[in-house]
């Protein structure tokens, strides 16, 4: 049986592929695919403006190929988790 | 409303804290806490032997303080996701 943690990891991977397969290279996110993912799958993305999407794309695209590969996406999610985790530290003080 | 991706990220953070708070520093995983997390929350952990836990601990503990902090845990989960993601690439070929 799948544990909650395994299910969560699967969701991270499946969400990437839900968008990466839409256009161009099916294993990477284009700017348009990243925008759709962030807007549809993350509450914080709903208020993002075009300029913010550009900034996010530039920040995540470590190898500057104008695509977000799975490794770059994974670093993005880690950063979101770290931000969330910081709340625990603040609560614990 | 929480999206599946947001719920997944919350599960990663909450799972860490479910174990990190058990003993010692409540914001890091000791060897015993890591062992419990891996054995209970990951199917692959059920067959791990003491030697494998030692190896995992050594691999994850980048700053060699005998504790796994959230950043180190996050790198571990990213690696698991990357391994899972590789299946998509194999299927796509």
Image (spheres, coloured by chain):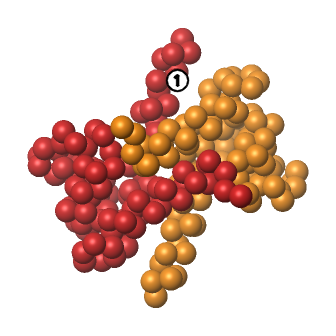
Chain colours: A orange, B red
- Chain letter of mark 1 equals B
The one nearer the camera, A21 or A1, is A1
The one nearer the camera, B49 or A4, is A4
Q: Is A4 on the left or on the right of A36, as rendered?
A: left
Above or below residue A28? Residue B25 is below
Q: Which residue is located at x 51 percent, y 16 percent? A: B91
Q: Which residue is located at x 53 percent, y 64 percent? A: A82
Q: Is A65 on the left or on the right of B8, as rendered?
A: right
Q: Which residue is located at x 19 percent, y 62 percent? A: B32
> Which residue is under mark 1?
B88
Residue A14 image position (x, y, % from top left): 58, 34
Mark 1 lies on a secondary structure that is helix
Residue A10 image position (x, y, % from top left): 50, 38
Q: Which residue is located at x 84 percent, y 59 percent? A: A47
Above or below residue B24? Residue B87 is above
Residue B52 image position (x, y, % from top left): 17, 44
Q: Is A1 on the left or on the right of B51, as rendered?
A: right
Residue B29 image position (x, y, % from top left): 30, 65
């Amino acid at each position: 049986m799948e544990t909650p943690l395994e299910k969560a990891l699967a969701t991270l991977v499946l969400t990437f592929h839900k968008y990466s397969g839409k256009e161009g290279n099916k294993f990477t996110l284009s700017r348009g695919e990243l925008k759709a993912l962030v807007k549809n799958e993350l509450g914080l993305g709903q208020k993002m403006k075009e300029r913010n999407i550009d900034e996010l794309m530039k920040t995540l695209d470590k190898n500057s190929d104008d695509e977000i590969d799975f490794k770059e996406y994974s670093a993005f999610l880690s950063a979101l988790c770290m931000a969330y985790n910081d709340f625990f530290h603040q609560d614990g003080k």
